[in-house]
Image (tube, rainbow, N blue to C red):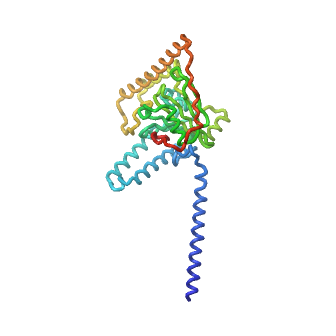
Amino acid sequence: MTFRYFTMVVCAVLSLAVAGSSSTAFAQKKAAPQQADQTQLSSVLGDISWGDRKNDVVQKMRSAMLTKLREDPKLRSDRTLMQEEHRKVLARVKAIEDSYTELKGERSGYEVSVISGEFMQNNGESMLRVRDDVAQRFYFFIDGQFYRMVVAYNPDYLAKVGFEAFVVQTARRYGKPVSTEYGEVRGEEELIQVTWNDGGSELRVENKKEFFATFSMTFTDAAMLKRLQSSQRNVGTGGAVKRDAEVSALVQGLSDSAANDRNERVVDHLVGNISVDLSDGRPREDIQAEIEEEAAAIQAAADEKAGKSKKATKKKKTTKKKPARDFGNIDTKSGGDDLIIY
């Protein structure tokens, strides 16, 4: 009797062990595709994937925000506060949905903004904008598929940060870059662009302080970019805002358009206060004043640069060149947690 009982117990334990190992193997098999699809650069997207449609992106954002609320211990113990924060999340999601812009026609307002080089008009592109504590994020779609995210930092957040320091911090998160590019900034040779590529995604970090007092990070689906290029379809490749005569025409057109069409939605601060603003329907005069102020700032920057260029030509001043920065020796494991790097 005792031996039979012992045999039954051993058989039961072995059965549970086999079942457990099978379940683990099945779980690992299910998780494998998702892990294989994610690359170091695309991890910035969270649950969002390259190729997602607009509604999928919005719903994934909504789900992530609500999950964060549910996991907050302070909110779990305060039902009233939880309901208030839940209302704010839903309002924020609606603001994101309302920001959807089809980049077609003559003007969208973004042609002279910090993202002016990241898209092309009448190219089947559209965009969502999201604001958080330190930056604005722009989600670009082409033919309805998500393929690019641009992060434009709040100028106040980067007021005392140099571009090379920013690049070093980025390298500490994403590893060594694959290329660097230098250009003339205020009469001197400066680092203006650094690129990463991990096969699945590309990241361009650009110095846009001359015109917009900020830096930008542009994440792009590398596979989509390759397909578009192979089909000879043009897409935005970054760079500063259009200058000189083009700026004047765009600034004038933007102001005229906003004044004549009260139903036209215009971009608010190019990179202004990035705290979530749930108010809408401000007086039209305030919005028009913002447009004119931003347009004037861009025009002034273009005029100043043109004036300096003419002076440099007259004096035949030689451009000062800085030695190329070698980012190959960056210690990617040490420090670098002072800035929020996406």
Above or below residue 255? Residue 163 is below
The residue closer to the viewer here, 93 or 207, is 207
Can residue 121 be seen here? no
**Spot occupied by residue 39 in the image (x, y as percentages of width and height):** 58, 46
**Spot occupied by residue 119 in the image (x, y as percentages of width and height):** 55, 32
Residue at the limit of the structure toward the right, as seen here: 230
Q: In which quarter of the image is residue 160?
A: top left
Above or below residue 320? Residue 271 is below
Q: In which quarter of the image is residue 145?
A: top right
**Number of numbered discs overlaid on the protein picture:** 0
Q: Residue at x 53, y 27 (%)?
A: 240
Left or right position of 285 against 32: left
Residue at the limit of the structure toward the top, as seen here: 314
Q: Residue at x 52, y 49 (%)?
A: 47
Q: Residue at x 36, y 28 (%)?
A: 286
Above or below residue 26? Residue 303 is above
**Spot occupied by residue 69 in the image (x, y as percentages of width and height):** 40, 51
Left or right position of 264 against 77: right
The residue closer to the viewer here, 76 or 287, is 76
Can residue 29 be seen here? yes
